């Protein structure tokens, strides 16, 4: 049986004081979250060491927001998987829509980052999802399949058995718009069916998270869907009480 997972993507937010306060608030209320529900937080690179020290020994796991497609060398501004592993990261987000659409990361680059994350001993959270114009054109499944296939063709279907997938409709990220539970479930079911056509066991065991303006008020409805196994949470993860409420709904 798949266990729920809620991961907070803090994006480019916070300073040492606010990050410390946020994680202390989460740790102070974590007993409200059922033991079966997984929890992870993904701070900015400069705060990973700080947060890692604060969550050490707790049930809250540490994740990074991106990883280099190379392990070392002349790649200014990149952070490698061995660096993240050394600092204690369990998870790393790859292919977030902001990386794809603001910074132009291709499917091939995302697949390479995914591969390096796993080689470095971390669990990649692979983000897939469509733009508003792609949804309106009826191309949601085409886009999601292309993004999944890039990783599968590079690393093999078995690699998804050691990963998490997050469906994030780009039109619902930071906009206040949220896919309805039925809309989200439809895409999650499609993702699982696509993987099942290659490996039933991988598909059944894969945690598929929903990301896109999830809040305490709508989390329970989304997470009650058969193929939604938790959330990748943006803005709401910057509030400890709301993040805990979302985690508890998983």
Image (cartoon, rainbow, N blue to C red):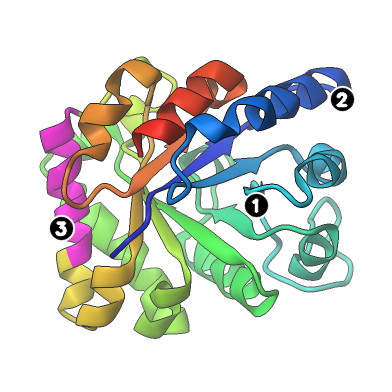
Query: Up-down: is 27 above or below 36?
Result: above
Q: Which residue is mark 2?
A: 16
Q: Is residue 239 left or right of residue 48?
A: left
Q: Nearer the viewer, residue 101 or 7?
A: 7
User: Which is more N-terminal, label 1 or label 2?
Assistant: 2
Q: Which residue is mark 1?
A: 66
Please report the residue visible at 28 percent of the width from the left and 65 percent of the height from the top.
Answer: 1
How busy is the neighbourhood of tag 1: few (under 14 within 10 Å), some, or many (20 plus)?
A: many
Give the magenta part as a residue range.
180-192
Q: Where, by quadrant of the figure, is residue 245 drawn?
A: top left
Q: Is residue 59 left or right of residue 23?
A: left
Q: Main secondary structure of the magenta part?
A: helix
Q: Position of residue 140 (x, y in %)?
A: 19, 47
- Mark 2 vs mark 1, foreground winner is 2
How busy is the neighbourhood of tag 3: few (under 14 within 10 Å), some, or many (20 plus)?
A: some
Secondary structure under the numbered disc 2 in the rendered image: helix
Secondary structure under the numbered disc 1 in the rendered image: loop
Query: Up-down: is 216 above or below 7?
Result: above
Q: Are marks 2 and 3 in contact (CB under 8 Å)?
A: no
Q: Which residue is mark 3?
A: 190
Q: Are marks 2 and 1 in contact (CB under 8 Å)?
A: no
């Amino acid at each position: 049986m798949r266990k729920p997972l809620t991961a907070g993507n803090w994006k480019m937010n916070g300073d040492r004081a606010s990050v410390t306060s946020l994680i202390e608030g989460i740790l102070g209320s974590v007993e409200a979250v059922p033991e079966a529900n997984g929890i992870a937080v993904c701070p900015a690179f400069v705060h990973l060491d700080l947060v890692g020290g604060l969550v050490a020994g707790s049930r809250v796991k540490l994740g990074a927001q991106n990883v280099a497609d190379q392990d070392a060398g002349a790649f200014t501004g990149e952070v490698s998987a061995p660096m993240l592993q050394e600092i204690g990261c369990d998870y790393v987000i790859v292919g977030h829509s902001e990386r794809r659409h603001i910074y132009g990361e291709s499917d091939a680059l995302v697949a390479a980052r995914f591969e390096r994350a796993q080689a470095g001993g971390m669990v990649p959270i692979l983000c897939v999802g469509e733009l508003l114009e792609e949804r309106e054109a009826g191309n949601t499944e085409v886009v999601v399949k292309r993004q999944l296939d890039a990783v599968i063709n590079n690393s093999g279907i078995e690699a998804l058995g050691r990963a998490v997938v997050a469906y994030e409709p780009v039109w619902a990220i930071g906009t206040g718009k949220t896919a309805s539970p039925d809309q989200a479930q439809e895409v999650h079911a499609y993702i699982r069916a696509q993987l099942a056509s290659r490996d039933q066991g991988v598909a059944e065991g894969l945690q598929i998270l929903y990301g896109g303006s999830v809040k305490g008020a709508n989390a329970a409805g989304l997470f009650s869907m058969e193929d939604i196994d938790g959330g990748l949470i943006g803005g709401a993860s910057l509030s400890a009480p709301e993040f805990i409420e979302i985690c508890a709904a998983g």
